[in-house]
Image (cartoon, grey):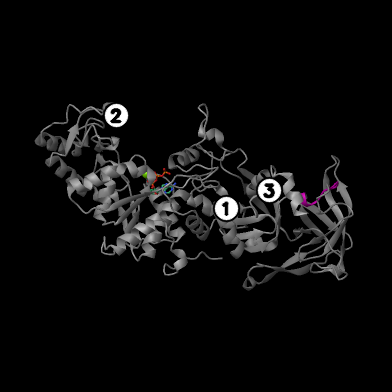
């Protein structure tokens, strides 16, 4: 199974007209950018990308593709304390894996540091920026509130010459961190708090992962982002809603400098149930060892989802399905899981594997005989062909598929009951073997040779079909089952005395050893994905698999157990009268 590229942009199905795309269409119709479409995806390299970033990537790269434009990859690397090349590399890998290509257009805000500095000097010269010698703490406390204006700094009216001089000394490393900052001179009474003389530059004696020790003066996000867009001649600067109140400042800097003016448009970020989506929090999980790393299969990171077994197609389809709006909301994790099921159902080959084995001895099956039975690789795709599965006298079935004392609706194996073994025979349980503690350790069964392939010539019906593995041939390995990272649906729903980490689900990982899998799975390539019949979708772990065979991660169950539980709960209060009417 290979991962394909995103849809051909000429395929009209791949063009979805959300409000951002509508803006592009309208701009093109009005000749606003001379028909040019230039977007960018601007991650800060201070962590690994998560599924929320995928939404932004699909939007920015998607629009560029659909409208014959270009999307740049731009690292927004203005905070040396938190950034690292490890993150740069992982971001590039993840964007490529998702299926997008930035060509030659790989940029770094740090490449613009000289230009930004020059622009800052220009603003000082125009009387639009000044060096403030208050501490950041003082600046913050004088900012005012939404109802009260801020207080002007005593340094606000410094002469241009003095500002230029101080700013040059800041750059030359003559001051300690925090001694001065450069601020824009806008309006301390502005109704937009962000416009109350925002900080443009701060001193940080810190080594940058690209510029080394060249700088000890670093620009703030707001003084960097819009100008970077401008330098790259971005047409549509698409960002998340929390930047809406930064827009007046974005516009102010570009206007004050009189340079090319990109247009910022905001959309709602993705929030998912049962997980966290902030790099800061994800970093905490990694640093505190609560997960095995950024690529732990429980993480909502792209590297975690990839290791879990997610395909780029599933993630892109998910992003298409959730769409793009102006309203913040919480998307159910099951929507993401369903995209994976839909994709893998079409593409993943079927295999049999027993996670919690129970031994079955077929008493009337000849000792030492092995039959190679034919099994279908994908019922939905004939071209996937068939494979041979060995059958012999001693088998494993799933422990859950047997009950000694079955309740009414349990149709699987129990004493005296006949069931079908997939692709094999009907078997009947004749005896239950227990250990001293009374635990069932083995079943004795008989098989009907006439039912080879799984059907009875006399038309006899059975109510259950079980998966199985031949004991002698099985590949024994470890399988990891995953549940939600958090135990609460809405992670923002925190009581005053609760910490978000209290919500971590202690049962998010269950490691099963001694699982018995169909022999062909021993040769599964790391990263390859299968449907284990009746159990879900599984992926050979790309990190922990050894040369002598893979371990598997469950990517998703077959059906959404959660949705089912919810549905049942919803159905309960239905009035009884309704049912009667149907009769
Ligand atoms: P986080 O809040 O998770 O730490 P961030 O916004 O600080 O993320 P950036 O590296 O600045 O991370 O993000 C790069 C781009 O991805 C930005 O344009 C940002 O708006 C977008 N983005 C980040 N999180 C989401 C999300 N949950 N949904 C959609 N877009 C997102
Ligand atoms: Mg950010």
Q: Residue at x 69, y 45 (%)?
A: 574
Q: Write the start and end of the magenta stretch as one range.
A: 400-406
Are the residues at dot 1 and dot 2 in contact (C-beta closer than 8 Å)?
no
Q: Which residue is mark 1?
A: 337
Please state which of residues 513 and 65 is positioned toward the viewer in this rendering. Answer: 65
Please state, as top left, top right, bottom left or bottom right, where the N terminus lies in the image: bottom right
Circle 2 packing at 10 Å, graded few (<14), some (14-19), many (20+), is few
Residue 492 image offset from top left, x and y in percent: 50, 37
| 168 sits left or right of 261 in the view | left
Residue 65 falls within the magenta-colored stretch: no
Question: Can you tell me whether the CB of the residue at mark 2 lies under 8 Å from the nearest atom of ligand 2?
Answer: no
- Cα distance in 3D space between marks 1 and 2: 44 Å
Q: Which residue is mark 2?
A: 140
Residue 185 image offset from top left, x and y in percent: 19, 36
Q: Which residue is mark 3?
A: 513
Which label sits in the foreground, 1 or 3? 1
Asked if 492 appears above or below 16 in the picture, the reply is above
- Cα distance in 3D space between marks 1 and 3: 25 Å
Residue 353 image offset from top left, x and y in percent: 70, 57
| 132 sits left or right of 9 in the view | left
């Amino acid at each position: 199974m290979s991962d394909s590229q995103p849809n051909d942009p000429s395929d009209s199905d791949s063009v979805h007209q959300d409000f951002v795309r509508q803006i592009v269409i309208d701009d093109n119709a009005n000749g606003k950018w001379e028909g040019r479409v230039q977007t960018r995806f601007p991650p800060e390299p201070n962590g690994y990308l998560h599924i929320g970033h995928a939404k932004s990537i699909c939007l920015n790269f998607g629009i560029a593709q659909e409208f014959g434009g270009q999307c740049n990859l731009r690292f927004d690397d203005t905070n040396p304390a938190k950034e690292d090349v490890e993150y740069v590399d992982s971001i590039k890998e993840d964007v490529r894996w998702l299926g997008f290509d930035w060509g030659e257009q790989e940029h770094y805000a740090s490449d613009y540091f000289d230009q930004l500095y020059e622009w800052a000097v220009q603003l000082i010269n125009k009387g639009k920026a000044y060096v403030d010698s208050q501490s950041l703490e003082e600046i913050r406390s004088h900012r005012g509130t939404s109802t009260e204006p801020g207080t002007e700094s005593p340094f606000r009216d410094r002469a241009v010459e003095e500002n230029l001089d101080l700013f040059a000394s800041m750059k030359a490393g003559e001051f300690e961190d925090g001694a001065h900052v450069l601020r824009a001179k806008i309006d301390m009474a502005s109704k937009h708090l962000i416009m109350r003389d925002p900080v443009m530059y701060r001193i940080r004696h810190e080594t940058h992962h690209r510029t080394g020790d060249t700088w000890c003066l670093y620009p703030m996000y707001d003084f960097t982002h819009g100008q970077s867009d401008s330098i790259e001649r971005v047409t549509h600067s698409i960002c998340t809603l929390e930047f809406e109140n930064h827009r007046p400042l974005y516009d102010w800097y570009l206007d004050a400098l009189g340079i090319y003016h990109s247009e910022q448009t905001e959309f709602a970020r993705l929030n998912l149930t049962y997980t966290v989506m902030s790099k800061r929090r994800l970093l905490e999980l990694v640093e505190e060892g609560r997960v095995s790393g950024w690529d732990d299969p429980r993480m909502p990171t792209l590297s975690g989802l990839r290791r879990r077994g997610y395909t780029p197609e599933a993630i892109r389809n998910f992003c298409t399905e959730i769409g793009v709006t102006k309203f913040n909301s919480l998307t159910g994790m099951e929507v993401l899981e369903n995209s994976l099921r839909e994709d893998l159902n079409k593409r993943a080959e079927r295999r049999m594997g027993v996670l919690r084995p129970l031994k079955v001895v077929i008493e009337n099956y000849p000792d030492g005989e092995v039959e190679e039975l034919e099994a279908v690789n994908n019922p939905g795709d004939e071209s996937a062909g068939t494979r041979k599965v060995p059958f012999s006298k001693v088998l494993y079935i799933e422990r859950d598929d047997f009950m000694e004392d079955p309740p009414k609706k349990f149709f699987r194996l129990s004493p005296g009951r006949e069931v079908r073994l997939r692709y094999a025979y009907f078997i009947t349980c004749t005896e239950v073997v227990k250990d001293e503690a009374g635990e069932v350790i083995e079943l004795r069964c008989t098989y009907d040779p006439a039912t080879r392939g799984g059907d009875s010539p006399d038309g006899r019906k059975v109510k259950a079909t079980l998966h199985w593995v031949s004991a002698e041939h099985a590949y024994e390995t470890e399988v990891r089952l995953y549940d939600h990272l958090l135990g609460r649906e809405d992670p923002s729903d925190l009581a005053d005395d609760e910490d978000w980490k209290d919500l971590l689900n202690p049962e998010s990982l269950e490691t099963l050893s001694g699982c018995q899998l169909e022999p062909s799975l021993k040769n599964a390539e790391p990263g390859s994905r299968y449907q284990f019949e009746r159990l879900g979708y599984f992926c050979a772990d790309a990190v922990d698999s050894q040369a002598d065979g893979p371990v598997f991660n469950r990517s998703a169950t077959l059906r959404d157990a959660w949705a089912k539980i919810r549905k049942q709960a919803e159905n309960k209060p239905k009035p009884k009268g309704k049912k009667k009417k149907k009769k």
